[in-house]
Image (cartoon, rainbow, N blue to C red):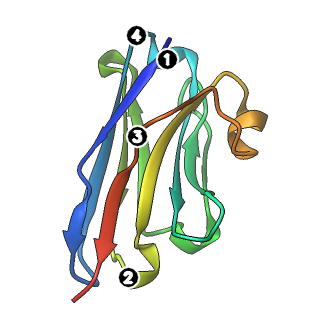
Amino acid sequence: QVRLVESGGGLVQPGGSLRLSCVASGGTASNYNMGWFRQTPGKEREFVAGVKRGGDSIHYKDSVRGRFTISRDDAKDTVTLRMDSLNPDDTAVYYCAAANSWVALAARRPDYWGQGSQVTVSS
């Protein structure tokens, strides 16, 4: 059983930056495709960014490409989401996810979810 623990959320002004981290315990992160999702009240959870097992393929939601950067450090069982040029539309609860199958991850059906971390962008 893999447990994903997120950290790094908070309140930031428009144009600011935040970094979210997700540490995997109880398993080896290198075995999984890893991703970040976000959700706002009344809306479905949406894919934000993902990095495939091995780290050689990365994908982003169109609206965050160029502003967000996902990276993984398998030696530390950690995946990080660096978020720059944040705007109020980025306000959401952000979830880390791990999946054996990339298709499952992209379809919002990962094997494991983190508990979520609130990101609020407001002046």
Residue ID for mark 4: 26
Which one is in front in this view, the residue at disc 4 or the one at disc 1? 4
Q: Amino acid at mark 2?
A: Asn
SS at mark 3? loop
> Would you say the residues marked 4 and 2 are in contact, meaning their CB atoms lie under 8 Å apart?
no
Which one is in front in this view, the residue at disc 3 or the one at disc 4? 3
- Name the residue rendered at 61%, 63% in the picture: 61
Q: Earlier in the sequence, mark 2 or mark 1?
A: 1
Q: CA distance from mark 4 to mark 2?
A: 35 Å
- Name the residue rendered at 66%, 62% in the picture: 44
Residue 33 found in image quarter: top right
Image position of 44 with respect to 25: above or below: below
Q: Amino acid at mark 4?
A: Gly
- Residue 100 x, y percent position in the rendering: 67, 21
Q: CA distance from mark 3 to mark 4?
A: 15 Å
Which one is in front in this view, the residue at disc 2 or the one at disc 1? 2
> Would you say the residues marked 2 and 1 are in contact, meaning their CB atoms lie under 8 Å apart?
no
Q: CA distance from mark 1 to mark 3?
A: 20 Å
Q: Amino acid at mark 3?
A: Gln
Q: Which mark is residue 30?
A: 1
For label 1, count other residues whose C-alpha is less than 10 Å away and answer few (under 14), some (14-19) or many (20+).
some
Quarter placement of the C terminus:
bottom left
Residue ID for mark 3: 115
- Residue 29 x, y percent position in the rendering: 46, 19
> Would you say the residues marked 1 and 3 are in contact, meaning their CB atoms lie under 8 Å apart?
no
